[in-house]
Image (spheres, rainbow, N blue to C red):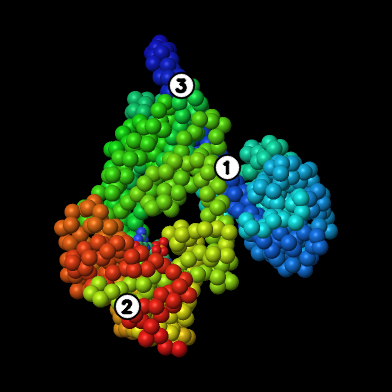
Amino acid sequence: MKWRFKTNLKLVALIVLPLIFAALMQTFDSFRMLNNIAESVNRQEHVRSAQAAQSAIYSLRAGLEGIATDNAHWDDAAVLAYEPVDIAWLQQTWGVGTTDSNYDTVFVLDAKGQTIVGYHLGEKMEVPASEYIGPALYLALAALPDDNMTFTSISSFVQTPNGVAFFAIAPILPYSEGKKLKFEKPNYLLILKTVTADSVATLGQNFILHDLKLGPLNSLEDGGQIVPNRWGQPVAKLYWTDSNPGKAARDAHQLSVVLNILTLVGVMLPLALVHLSTLARIEKSEKQAHHSAHHDALSALPNRVLLIEEITKGLPLANTENGEMALAFIDLDGFKAVNDAYGHEIGDCLIKVVAEGLQKIAGDQFVVARLGGDEFALFRAGRDSFAETEIVAEKILQFIREPFDLQGRIVSVGASIGLVKCNDPNMVVSEFMRQADIAMYDAKENGRNRWRKFNANLDLERAENLSIVAELRSILEKDLIEVAYQPFVSSRDREILGVEALARWPQSSHRKLGPDRFIALAEQHGLIDKLGMAILRKSCRDMSNWRDLKVAVNFSPLQIKRLSLVQDIQTVAAEFNFDLRRLEVEFTESVLIQNPDRAKIVIGELQALGVTVALDDFGTGYASVGYLHRFAFDKIKLDRSLTQSLSRGSMAPNIVQGTVLIAKGLSADVIAEGVETEEDATLMRLAGCELLQGYYFGKPQSLTALNDALLGHPTRSKSVSA
Ligand code: C2E
Ligand code: CA
Ligand code: CA
């Protein structure tokens, strides 16, 4: 017995102990691997979060700088915030402003940085700015350009008695170029926005940072990302809870590994297998979790998070020795229209098809990402990256310009692409992306379907645009927008039948701007309704005496969205006793594409009131004739490129004549625009146009000039009624 027991023991020792040892080793190993996987997932997540936090801070700062600029670049302020200072005005304007949500504290400083007055949440401040924000004030003043008369602003972070705040400071200067400051050195506007728990939490939600908090530097809490001011001095710490996607999965699986140890001895072999498959499973689910956090579900392309990671990885390559980084932002033009017209299913389908196309064109040298909505990005680091990106951008434009067949529907869209190059390994990723974004908007503003490269001038251009918008806002408020009238005539006897009203930038302004530029800005900044109605009102007023002249007014596609449009038109006409049967409304084709159902209703309602509805710029768009038939236009205006191509021989006459025939096929009157010579006039009449308009018959002119011309016109002088 004894012997057998000993033998068994030996056997146990010999076989089982090594097995137990092996199992323990394996368990230990599993833990280690699990930990490694979990940690690497967490690390990546942390990098992403830190980048997101950086972008979040940047977005707040940039926003505040914009507000400071808007407020300090102001003709009124450049007078009233200077000796003799109008304290009541400062209180009314900026003091009251501190109760709204954009900023909570404001100081007006003299040229030396001494506080003239300060407000916090609507109350006058007892402490001066130098005390409220400390030495940061003088650092900021010193960081402004030397001459101090350049319009710029400086923003940063600072610790105040009310907590950490963003601040932005800007010299108070006249906004209109003609106006000069009466003093040699400017006063300053300093605005602050205290960071509240709520504002940080909202930021956290927007940038997907859990429990985002801002804490003081001396906080006892572990970790945290230091937030420096623009001079590199730490001001506060940002905390958030990493979502640690690796940890949760690891914890769950560790438990199962521990249970496995308990049943270790008996089931050695199966256990080992279970271990292996558990590991494989964990690895797989980690991979899946990681993949879905870094990819877009619809297109399966990398998302913004992964793009930011890739750019961060590319930074070391961004120097002249190794090449550069190149980034392209691609935004589809007309995507919303497709979604609105055909529904989200077709919209999604378009996104997928575009995503596939982009990947195919770019190949595997590029990271192709979807940033959300209809925005995509291409990124590449290393030698020749930028040149390659230019080539690819060109191909992408061609690809997107072609109509897509989506489940049997033919859909046309375009794209605007912004490109940016970087040779600086210290570039801030969010700034790099902002530059691509600005270039993309430049492409959009310059007529879409093109790519544009970022340059520092674009920043200036953007500032210039904002200042034009501010001037336009004030022009509209003061009702200073001007109208020029261009006659159109019958092609048969050349009698003037009506005029087109064209918006003109006031001559009193120091700027000279064409309508193409300021109308586009009005559209982008929500001013087009106001502008459109102002032109309509002035036209009705100016033309009320010419009782048998038609008056054509241009309407932007955006105006048609306003539900009260038809009612507003009626009200304005009634105000001047203007017969609606004399009114013509001109829309371009884009209105039919962007909002066809609404367009159809509005066109019908206008026609019921006796208004003539004209389709402008015919021959330049894409809409098929079948489609145009859905809208019963009274009049079709042939684009001037058609008129001019006929006499200048740049287009085959049969194409022009074909277009005229198509227009006539829509059972509408046809008018040729851009008639500059007798030859143009004759050719367009022979091609079948009943009406003609162009410099040959009269340029767009002031009301006075038009009145003179009409009175001198043989068939017209009789028709004026006082
Ligand atoms: P549009 O409606 O096609 O206006 C005709 C444009 O052709 C005008 O340019 C006019 O000055 C120009 N034009 C007229 N005859 C000739 C000619 O013989 N030769 C040449 N080369 N050009 C000629 P303008 O005034 O610069 O307006 C540009 C565009 O701005 C307009 O194109 C219209 O789309 C828009 N626009 C102008 N005023 C308004 C407005 O009050 N509201 C809206 N929504 N858009 C407006
Ligand atoms: Ca027009
Ligand atoms: Ca036109």
Q: Residue 254, image x and y in percent? A: 47, 34
Q: Dot 3, crowdedness within 10 Å: few (<14), some or many (≥20)?
A: few
Q: Is residue 299 left or right of residue 182?
A: left
The residue at label 1 has a CB less than 8 Å from ligand 1: no
> In this rendering, does residue 200 appear at all?
no
Q: Is residue 102 above or below residue 275?
A: below
- Quadrant where the C terminus lies? bottom left
Mark 3 residue type? Met
Mark whose residue sits in front, 2 or 3: 2
Q: Say which element carries label 3.
A: helix
Residue at 41 percent of width and 75 percent of height: 709
Q: Residue at coordinates 65% horizontally, 49% vertically from top-left?
A: 151
Q: Decide which of 534, 500 is in the foreground and name it.
A: 500
Label 2 – label 3 distance at C-alpha: 97 Å
Depth order, front residue of 36/505? 505
- Badge 2 crowding class, 10 Å Cα cut-off, few under 14, some 14 to 19, many 20 or more, is some
**Which residue type carries mark 1?**
Gln
Disc 2 element: strand
Q: Which residue is mark 3?
A: 25
Q: Amino acid at mark 2?
A: Leu
Tag on residue 497? Answer: 2
Residue at horizontal 81 percent and vertical 48 percent from the top: 112
Q: Position of residue 444 (x, y in %)?
A: 41, 52
- Which residue is at 26% across, 59% downward? 642
Residue occupied by mark 1: 54
Q: What SS does tag 1 mark? A: helix
**How far apart in space, not on screen, are marks 1 and 3 (Cα)?**
43 Å
* Alpha carbon distance from label 1 to label 2: 62 Å
